[in-house]
Amino acid sequence: MLPSLRLLLLVFALGAFGMFAIGCGGSHASMRFVHASPDAPNVDVAVDGKTVATNLPFTSVSPGTGYLTITAGNRLVEVRTTGTATDLVNAPNVGFSSHLQYTVFFTGLVKANPPTQTINLVTDDNSTPQSGNIKLRVFHASPSGPTHLDIYIVAPGTDITNLSPTISALAYQQASGYQSVPPTSNEVIMAATGDPTKARLIDQTYNLTAGQIRTLVVVDQQNVPAMSPTPLVLADLN
């Protein structure tokens, strides 16, 4: 083969490899982290050994807005007490799919016997709500609350006595689906699943505007074994 032809083929091969490498490098996911363990200290978070968040207190979110970009695939996620090398959680195969957004919730109790702290990976959907509505979902992160919650999203002042819940039997450490609701004042009521009295454990009213997406995180009170009456609100979009 002529030297000039061999050189041309080599250049083409290197160019093709370069395009392949760039394409692979574009395989990314997005994540944010929520500290929802009520008896845990401030924590640092590492992905594949690289610290991505530091000194996060209970009910904090990192990044404060938006998401952190990470390489898609199975990642090692570690949560440790701030300033130490001791893992509270060491999860070696957390799967992040390319081009998706995730919230990683740190939940459970570090002082329980045995400890129950863990992480919960939840896929987010920040596509724009349809028809000028809002999207609302709930994540149950209260270890002291009922194991399942019934959730009502209604107009303020609505009598829920004979109503079916908007979200039924939401389990601890699970996220509900997104609910599309009008951009008006919405009362969110939560009761223990199976409670015939529908006692209101949470009763909050939210005033949101069209195009917004929110996640309500049901949490305990810090260092108190009781569910907080006020969920943490994550501003997912707008």
Image (cartoon, grey):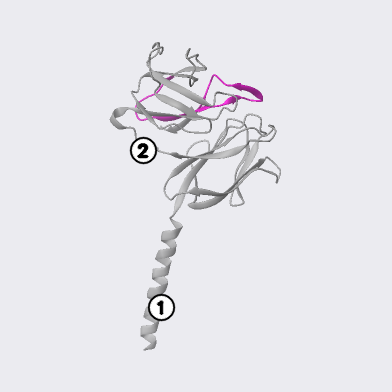
Q: Quadrant of the C terminus?
A: top left
Element under label 2? loop
Q: Quadrant of the N terminus?
A: bottom left
Is residue 226 a member of the stretch shown in magenta? Answer: yes
Image spot of residue 36 (x, y percent): 58, 32
Which residue is at 34% across, 35% downward?
Answer: 128
Closer to the N terminus: mark 2 or mark 1?
1
Residue receiving disc 2: 127
The quarter of the picture where residue 214 lies is top left
Which residue is at 44% across, 34% downward?
Answer: 236
The segment highlighted magenta reads 206-232
Is residue 103 a member of the stretch shown in magenta? Answer: no
Q: Amino acid under label 1?
A: Leu
Which residue is at 52% across, 17% downward?
Answer: 201
Element under label 1? helix
Left or right: 112 as drawn, with respect to 101: right
Image spot of residue 44 (x, y percent): 63, 41
Image spot of residue 61 (x, y percent): 55, 35
The quarter of the picture where residue 146 lies is top right
- Badge 1: how crowded within 10 Å, few (<14), some, or many (20+)? few
Residue receiving disc 1: 10
Image spot of residue 34 (x, y percent): 55, 35
